[in-house]
Amino acid sequence: MRASSFLLLFVLGLACHRGGTSKNDSPPTAAAPGASAVQIAAGAGRRTEVGKAQEQIKVPAGKFYAGSMPGDEGRDPTLEPVLASYDMPAFTMDALPYPGVPGEPPLTGLSQAEAQKKCTERGARLCTELEWERACRGPNGDAFAVGPAWDPTCEKTPEKCTSGFGARAMGTTIEEWTASPAVDPVKGGKKVALKGAFSAAPAPAHRCAARRALDPTVSTKLVGFRCCTGPESGPTVPVVEAQPTFKKSSLDRMSDVFAGIPELARVKQMPRFFKDTEIPEIVDKAKAPPGAGWVLTVDPIEWSPVPGTDLLVVTGRSKGGAFIVAFHKLPGDKLRLASSMLFVNEPGPIVLAYQPNIKREIVWSMAWGSAGEGGAITYRDDHRIVIVQR
C-alpha cells in the first residue's frame, strides 16, 4: 500500500461540554465544538460590581449535576467523576474566600487542618467539594462560575465575577481546600480534593468540575479556602476505579452510530467489521510474525488505558474505505468521538493488536511488520487519543 493510496483524518473529541443542570434537572448538553470568538464573548462573564456585599450566601436544597463528561476539554479522567446528579441539602457558604471581606486578599499558605481550624473558630466548617461545585454552577448548572464560558478578565478582578448563587471569585486566582478526600488512583496516597484554579492556569482548569488532589499537609500560597454551615452529611463523589485494560466487545447498529457523527460521513455507508478469517492475510504479509504476548483481533476493543477512561476502538470497512475509530463511552450506552483515521479507496483488512502490559497503546496493521502498513492508537499525557501511521 502506497502512502498516496489513503487519506489520513484525525478527529479529536475536544468539544467543551457544558456541565450542570437547568431548573428542570435535565442533563447539560455539549457545547458546539470550535465556538467562534464572538460566541465565546457573548457567553462569557456574569459580573457584578463590588459594593457592600454580604459575607455569606445561601444555597438552596435541590438536585444538580456535578462532574464532567469523557472527552471534555481539560478533563482529568483519573480524578474527575463522570457527570451525575446529586441531591444536595441547603447550606450557607462564604461569598468570598476566607476571610470573606470584600477588598481583602484571600488567606492562603495554610494546610487543610489549619484552614479547618479557622472555619471552626467561626462556628463553621470547610466546604465539601460538592458544595463548592454547587455554588459555582449556580441554578443553571453553568460550566464556569461566570457562565457557560470562561471570562479571562476575572483573573484581574476576581471579586467582580459572580456565580448564579452569588458566590464570588470562584475558580479565578487560587485553588481552594475542601473537606472531601480524593483518592488518586495513579499516584496514590492520602489526598484532599481541591477546587478552583490559579490565574496562570489554562481556561478549562477554571471549570466548576475541575478537580485536583493534594496532600492535606501541604501549605502553599496558591491555595485558600471557604467556610460553610449546614448539615455536615451529604452526598459524596464516587471513587474513580481502575478497569481491565483490554476487553473484546461489540458494537450494535454501527450504521446508526456513524450516521450521527458528521466527521464520519465518509464511512457511514454500509460500515461493517472485518472477519476473523482475514487475520491470517495480514500476518502472512509480515516480514516478521508477531512475537509472543500479542493479542490480534478484528473485533471492537474496550480499552481503559488509565483509571476513569473507558474507550471503544473499532475497525472495519465501508464504501468509503477502511477505517479506525475510537469512541469515548458515555453513560446510557452512548458514544462520543475521540479520534478517527480513514483510508480512502483502501479496503483493508486492518487488525488490532495489543499486549496486556502496554496499557496506553494499541497497534493497528494491514501487513504486520511492514513500514507504512501500520501504526498505533495512543493515549497521551494530555488525555487525548491520537491515531498515527508508522
Image: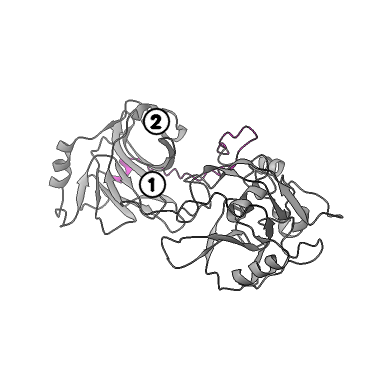
Question: Magenta residues: mostly which secondary structure?
Answer: loop
The magenta segment: 2-31
- Labelled pair 2, 1 in contact (Cβ < 8 Å): no
Between the C-alphas of marks 2 and 1, the distance is 17 Å
Residue at 31% across / 28% down in the picture? 319
Residue 367 appears anywhere in the view: no
How many numbered callouts? 2
Three-letter amino acid code of the residue under disc 2: Val
Q: Earlier in the sequence, mark 2 or mark 1?
A: 2
Residue 172 in the image, given as x and y percentages of width and height: 68, 58
Q: In the displayed structure, does residue 153 sit left or right of residue 332?
A: right
Q: Which residue is mark 1?
A: 310
Q: In the displayed structure, does residue 9 sit left or right of residue 31?
A: left
Q: Nearer the viewer, residue 156 or 372?
A: 156
- Residue 297: quadrant of the picture: top left
Q: Nearer the viewer, mark 2 or mark 1?
A: 1
Element carrying mark 2: helix
Find residue 257 and name its label: 2
User: Is 12 in the magenta?
Assistant: yes
